[in-house]
Image: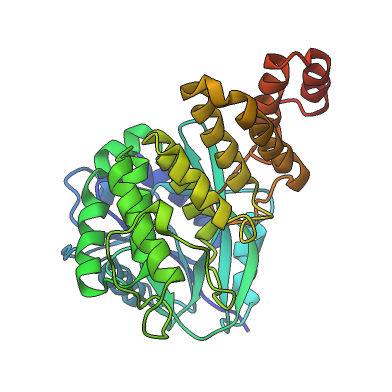
Amino acid sequence: MRWRSCLVVIARNEAATITRLLASVRPFVDDMLVMDTGSDDDTARRAEAAGARVTHFTWINDFAAARNAALEAAGADWHVVLDADEWLIGEGSGAALDALRTTAPDFVGTIALQDHFDGGTARSRLSRVLPGAVRYTGRIHEQPAHRLPVRPLAIEVAHDGYLPERLHVKQGRNAALLTAALQDDPSNPYLWYQLGKDHSVYDRFADAEAAFAKAVERLTAPTSGEPGDAGTNGMVAETVTSAPKDTVLPPWWFDLVARRLFGLKSLKRHADGLVFAETQLQACADSPDFFFALGDLLLDWAAELPAQAEVLIPMIEDAWRRCLEIGERPDQSGAVAGRGSHLAAHNLALVLEATGRTEEAESLRQSIPP
């Protein structure tokens, strides 16, 4: 039996990127639907020129509503949900998309997303290949609601929405929507994490820390017996404890921990960062991003307090050696490429040189080149 597949996109003022996306996917799907949510550039014209059907939706500050309207208009057996600032990459991705035409839509498929940001790339897996009946929930950072099996697919997608020129255009939008969503669901740790992430992307580290603290508190300190049901009392890093043993940490936890440590370093709250890191040693034992962020925080602390460098340098060295022992973990959500290899090796080599171990530093650089 043959199943019909459709690329489904919601877009607003994406004339600069929409053609790239559509051209990358067009050979491997039966249809492409672009729902314009209020562009005042030529997004719609370029989408049509690239072979997509274009429909229109009046934006109501609700991503799930827009996505669901687009899914209804698409009406396919398989919906491949991508954004205009994404595009298909990888040698096997086209074949994996093409295979949907002969695959029963009885599961949700995940794609490997490669985020490009100023200074590197990060990887995550997201549910973006949906059977026709699946719909979204959530005003922002919407999620497909279903009870179907989830399977990883050999589909790779790149995303450049975190590059500075793209972030400038979107500044403030997500924070406003997340704040509104949290008014409806203030005990949701995922929304607090996303709000903290949005603040951190724009270097609003004090706001990010407040949001991350609430995310940690709600996930790790429930008060009514239900996960994520804790109230807030303004506590910050030094009062946060590790998650209870029966708490199942979500996939985004590693990213939250690394971002929070970076934020606390930026706020010069090194002691708070170290206390928080100590609570995460077990949960993040296999995360190179955690140990990389920890080493970075400790190095900044040593630079600020040279008298403590003798104590801190062995801890810094241990953190970056641990990164290399773990290696790259692209399977972990938000993992930054290089933190388990050349980035950690570079930082460790600098420490080795600074402490008179030049031969070991050079050997390390040769064994793990950039």
Front residue (pair 135, 193): 193
Q: Who's the residue at 37% across and 80% down the image?
A: 223
The residue located at (41%, 41%) in the rendering is 264
Q: Is 326 displayed left or right of 188 in the figure? A: right
Query: Between 154 and 195, which is closer to the camera in this rendering?
Result: 195
Q: Residue at x 64, y 67 (%)?
A: 152
Please indicate whether residue 70 sits to the left or right of residue 227 in the image. left
Quarter of the image where one finds residue 291: top right
Above or below, 324 relative to 146:
above
Does residue 283 appear in the picture of this structure? Answer: yes
Q: Residue furthest front?
A: 307
In the picture, measured across the screen, residue 215 lies left or right of residue 158, that is left
Q: Position of residue 86 (x, y in %)?
A: 45, 49
Image position, residue 102 (x, y; %): 64, 76
User: Measured from the top left, where is residue 331 in percent x and y?
Assistant: 65, 57
Q: Residue at x 46, y 41 (%)?
A: 271
